[in-house]
Image (cartoon, helix red, strand yellow):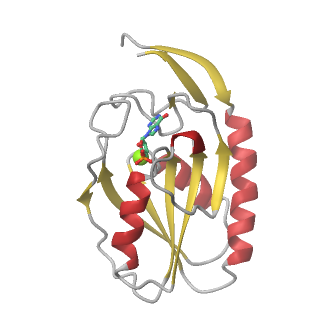
Amino acid sequence: MSSAIDRVLISSAQIQHRIREMAAEIESDYPDGPLYLVSILKGAFIFLADLARAMERPSVRIEFMGISSYGNAKTTSGQVKVTRDLDVNIEGHDVLIVEDIIDSGVTLNYLKRVLEQRRPKSLEIATLLDKPDRRIQPVYVKYVGFQIPDEFVVGYGLDYAEDYRNLSDIRVLSEP
Ligand code: IMP
Ligand code: MG
């Protein structure tokens, strides 16, 4: 690997603490019925696993979607496509999209429109990270773990060209 990973922006302990807070808030907002966590592959897989385990409500349904808008670049191509669709019907259900990071907002804007058409009972977004300075399409996000500055981060599921997803903290990538 030729890239250099620099400083830790958010430590593993900080992430876990914040996830417990988010899970408690989510659980109090959805007191009953099944809750569908729709996670976007691949970046959100670790956040999803920790968020789901921080909840104690009995019915948490785990679903995956694949969306791509980046390829191997560090900025959005602006082109979004579904690479793997849900295999359940979400009509009439509470759905929470679980995402790793919101950058331009293009991905979630698109996904929200796609899922809204399937008439869920409710549809909200939980993201671990938010880079508000980079937004080019507005999107309402109900649950945000951390707002971060405009820097490219890796670790805890987030990659650069498919590397670094395994790191347990969130780090700033200094030299691509
Ligand atoms: P958006 O459509 O620009 O909001 O892009 C969101 C997607 O871009 C995320 O799901 C990530 O896959 C990717 N992304 C955006 N910023 C970063 C970053 O700092 N590190 C790693 N991936 C990122
Ligand atoms: Mg992603």
* Residue displayed at 64% across by 37% down: 148
Q: Residue 66: image x %, image y %?
A: 31, 55
Q: Spot the residue most to the bottom.
A: 92
Q: Quadrant of the N terminus?
A: top left
Q: Is residue 80 left or right of residue 4?
A: left
- Viewer-nearest residue: 95 or 87: 95
* Residue displayed at 31% across by 30% down: 73
| Quarter-of-image position of residue 33 | bottom right
Q: Residue 7: image x %, image y %?
A: 63, 18
Q: Is residue 159 left or right of residue 19?
A: left
Q: Quadrant of the C terminus?
A: top left
* Residue displayed at 55% across by 28% down: 151
Q: Residue 55: image x %, image y %?
A: 66, 65
| Quarter-of-image position of residue 133 | top right
- Viewer-nearest residue: 69 or 159: 69
Q: Residue 51: image x %, image y %?
A: 61, 57
